Amino acid sequence: MSGETDLNKLIGSMQPVLSESEYVFASLEKDSQVSVAELAPLGTFYEKEGLTVIVPKTNADVSGLSYEGVFQCITLNVHSSLDAVGLTAAVSAALTRENISANVVAAYYHDHIFVPIAKANQALSCLQKLARDCE
């Protein structure tokens, strides 16, 4: 099932939804004794320095993982194509104007924006406005 590629349609129908969960980003070294399965990661990415995990904060705390910052996830509920051009840039630019950092994960069906928990509601409002302005 291919996703949408038209930028105006993507932005106008993206329906951002804020997760109530708190997430952190952490890195596990190759010899880490922490069980990835027990962390129940929302996402992982292999880097030369180690395995990056995006995990619920509570799971990181129980496992004793070190992390910097706590985030909430805003999911853009539009099925964007992996070939779509400009959605990440438009979302990032809107959040930049509000001085909100954005850690974007493009998954198969949707894009997910991790924003600092202290600015999560502001970020959601910003993205809702972006969508309304593009309808």
Image (cartoon, rainbow, N blue to C red):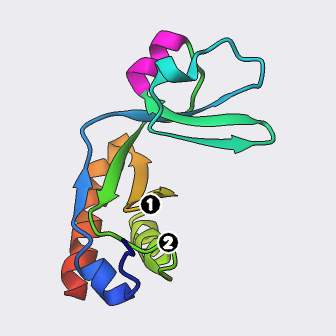
User: Outermost residue toward the right?
Assistant: 48
Q: Amino acid at mark 1?
A: Tyr
75 or 129, which is in the foreground?
75
Q: Quadrant of residue 6?
A: bottom left
Query: Which residue: 32% across, 69% down?
Result: 79
- Left-right relation of 53 to 46: left
Query: Which residue: 25% across, 50% down?
Result: 18
Q: How far across and how far down the image is residue 45, in percent? A: 63, 44
Q: Establish if 23 lies above or below 65.
A: below
Distance from label 2 to label 1 (Cα)?
A: 7 Å
Q: Is residue 60 magenta?
A: yes
What is the span of residues highlighted in magenta in the rendered image? 57-63
1 or 109, which is in the foreground?
1
Q: Please report contact status of discs 2 and 1: CB closer than 8 Å, yes or no.
A: yes
Can residue 60 be seen in this snapshot?
no
Q: Amino acid at mark 2?
A: Leu
Q: Locate the C terminus and report the quarter of the image it occupies.
A: bottom left
Q: Which residue is mark 1?
A: 108
Q: Is residue 21 magenta?
A: no
Can residue 97 be seen in this snapshot?
yes
Q: Establish if 116 lies above or below 32.
A: below
User: Outermost residue toward the front?
Assistant: 1
Query: Which residue: 41% across, 50% down?
Result: 115
Q: Which residue is mark 2?
A: 82
Q: Residues within 10 Å of mark 2 (few under 14, many from 20)?
A: some
